[in-house]
Image (cartoon, grey):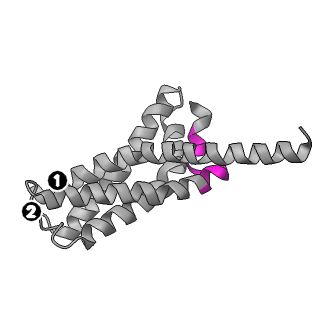
Amino acid sequence: MDHGTHHQHHAHHDSGTSWRTAAQATLHCLTGCAIGEVLGMVIGTAAGLHNATTVALSIALAFVFGYALTMRGVLRAGLPLRRALRVALAADTVSIAVMEVIDNTVVVAVPGAMDAGLGQLLFWASLVLSLALAFVLTTPVNRWMIGRGKGHAVVHAYH
């Protein structure tokens, strides 16, 4: 195989791996985000909090659970707490922020979703839709970041 052909093959292989890696990183991030997002929406709705307060609570909890999920893995790998926190911040901040903008925009934009009760399909359907869209739209962002050695690529050194 000549160098040009090898380079093309290598680039094609990296492209496929990057999408797979980006999807896995996004799913990992989405897991923590979804736990926090859903918990925040459930608490805010059940407590009758103002919509803005409910959204703020959901965002805060999404970041907490998103970072915690990443920290769990890197702490298990033996990193001290401060270093694990720095790795989680570097790995997940942009991904969580993008997801939160998308999923909260969707939930707020769906007519009646923020006012729906916990027992209503609209409440849960808007959350599922928002998280699915967050995954689809955040995966390319994560792919771009991982390709530059940023975002979730920072975590891979510790797995």
Instruction: Please give left or right for residue 39 compared with residue 92 in the image.
Output: left
> Residue 96: where, in percent of width, then height?
43, 55
Instruction: Please give left or right for residue 55 compared with residue 90 in the image.
Output: left
The Cα atoms of the two marked residues, 2 and 1, are separated by 10 Å
> Residue 129: where, in percent of width, then height?
29, 59
Q: Is residue 83 magenta?
A: no
Residue drawn at 55 percent across, 50 percent down: 90
The three-letter amino acid code for the residue at tag 1 is Val
Q: Is residue 137 above or below residue 65?
A: below
Instruction: Please tell me whether mark 1 sits on a helix, a strand or a loop.
Output: helix
Residue drawn at 27 percent across, 73 percent down: 109
Q: Rate crowding at label 2 as few (under 14), some (14 to 19) or many (20 or more) other CA atoms within 10 Å.
A: few
First-in-chain label (2 vs 1)? 1
Checking the image for residue 83, the label placed there is none
| Residue extending farthest right | 2
Q: Are marks 2 and 1 in contact (CB under 8 Å)?
A: no
Mark 1 highlights which residue? 42
Instruction: Please tell me whether mark 2 sits on a helix, a strand or a loop.
Output: loop
The three-letter amino acid code for the residue at tag 2 is Gly
Q: Is residue 29 above or below residue 99?
A: above
Tell me the quadrant of the picture where the C terminus can be found.
top right
Secondary structure character of the magenta stretch overall = helix
Residue drawn at 83 percent across, 46 percent down: 7
Of residues 109 and 78, the one drawn nearer to the viewer in this rendering: 109
Q: Which residues are magenta?
A: 144-155
Checking the image for residue 48, the label placed there is 2
Q: Quadrant of residue 144?
A: bottom right
Of residues 105 and 56, the one drawn nearer to the viewer in this rendering: 105
Residue drawn at 21 percent across, 57 percent down: 125
Tell me the quadrant of the picture where the N terminus can be found.
top right
